[in-house]
């Protein structure tokens, strides 16, 4: 079945270095919890023993002029655009991916908004083609994925609605043989778009990795990408890293 809308979402960095592996942005967040500067809440949480509350962020630092200022879309000192998209509730800065803030979810989602509706009983945004055609389970997203145990509601990973009404993160594959359990063609194409819109930082752009496809059992050498690595044989993203990362010599 169709997927839900997913949440749209580095440690201190060198001056002028834009964004991180999670977001493209021109500022650093000043964490209200520890007063440290991080590119995003995910980078903060990966490096600290506590979590950054995105809603409490009050200040940011420009990556160009380094002025610390009130959180806003454009630098008041040098006019650097911090993000094509900016939400003054979530304090989300990023490239324009047709994001929208859902008042009922309480966070930003990747749109476009007209392609999703908020189901009040399930309490999450779903694709329009599921309106009136899905089994409602009250507050279904306010739980952890039974496969990866990650929180579903705030995750940047798309959750899939099963016929029973439950949600799974990456639960599209059999836990025994790892083959895709559903027709994932539409989701793979969505991932194509997201990968194309999310360039990796310069230090990762020439990095390749060997992968094994769980669907066709083929092996490929592909460019590393944090969102997923696509099988060259069957075009599935249901793949696993089968070797270490390396810099492609023909691109050095």
Image: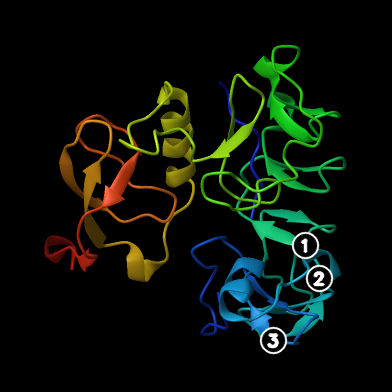
Find numbered disc 3 in the image and state the secondary structure of the residue it sits on: loop
For disc 1, the marked residue is 91
Q: CA distance from mark 2 to mark 3?
A: 15 Å
Residue for badge 2 = 71
Q: Are the residues tagged 2 and 3 within 8 Å (C-beta)?
A: no
Residue underneath mark 3? 36
SS under mark 1: loop
Residue, far front: 176
Quadrant location of the C terminus in the rendered image:
bottom left
* Residue 161, percent from left and from top: 61, 27
Q: Looking at the image, tell me whether mark 2 or mark 3 is earlier in sequence order.
A: 3
Q: Is residue 166 above or below residue 151?
A: above
Of labels 3 and 1, earlier in sequence is: 3
Between discs 2 and 1, the one toward the N terminus = 2
Q: Residue 24, located in which quarter of the rendered image?
A: bottom right
2 and 1 marks in contact (CB < 8 Å):
yes
**For the residues carrying marks 2 and 1, which lies nearer the camera in this image?**
1
Is 118 situated above or below 109? above
Q: In the image shown, does 61 or 160 lie closer to the viewer?
A: 160
Q: Quadrant of the N terminus?
A: top right
Residue 181, position as x, y percentages in the image:
41, 26
Which numbered mark, 2 or 3, is in the foreground of this view? 3
């Amino acid at each position: 079945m169709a997927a839900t809308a997913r949440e749209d979402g580095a440690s201190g960095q060198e001056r002028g270095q834009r964004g991180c592996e999670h977001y493209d942005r021109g500022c650093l967040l000043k964490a209200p919890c520890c007063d440290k500067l991080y590119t995003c809440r995910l980078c903060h949480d990966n490096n600290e023993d506590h979590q950054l509350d995105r809603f409490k962020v009050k200040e940011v630092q420009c990556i160009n002029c380094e002025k610390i200022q009130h959180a806003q879309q454009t630098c008041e000192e040098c006019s650097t655009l911090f993000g094509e998209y900016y939400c003054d509730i979530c304090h989300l800065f990023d490239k324009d991916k047709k994001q929208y803030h859902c008042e009922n979810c309480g966070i930003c989602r990747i749109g476009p908004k007209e392609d999703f509706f908020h189901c009040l009983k399930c309490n999450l945004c779903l694709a329009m083609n599921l309106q009136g055609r899905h089994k409602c389970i009250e507050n279904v997203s306010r739980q952890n994925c039974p496969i990866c145990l990650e929180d579903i509601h705030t995750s940047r990973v798309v959750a899939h609605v099963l016929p029973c009404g439950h949600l799974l993160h990456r639960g599209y594959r059999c836990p025994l043989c790892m083959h895709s359990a559903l027709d994932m063609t539409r989701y793979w194409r969505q991932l194509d778009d997201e990968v194309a819109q999310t360039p990796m930082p310069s230090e990762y752009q020439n990095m390749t990795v060997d992968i094994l496809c769980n669907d066709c059992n083929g092996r490929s050498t592909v460019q590393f990408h944090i969102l997923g690595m696509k099988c060259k044989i069957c075009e599935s993203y249901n793949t696993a890293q089968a070797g270490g990362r390396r810099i492609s010599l023909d691109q050095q």
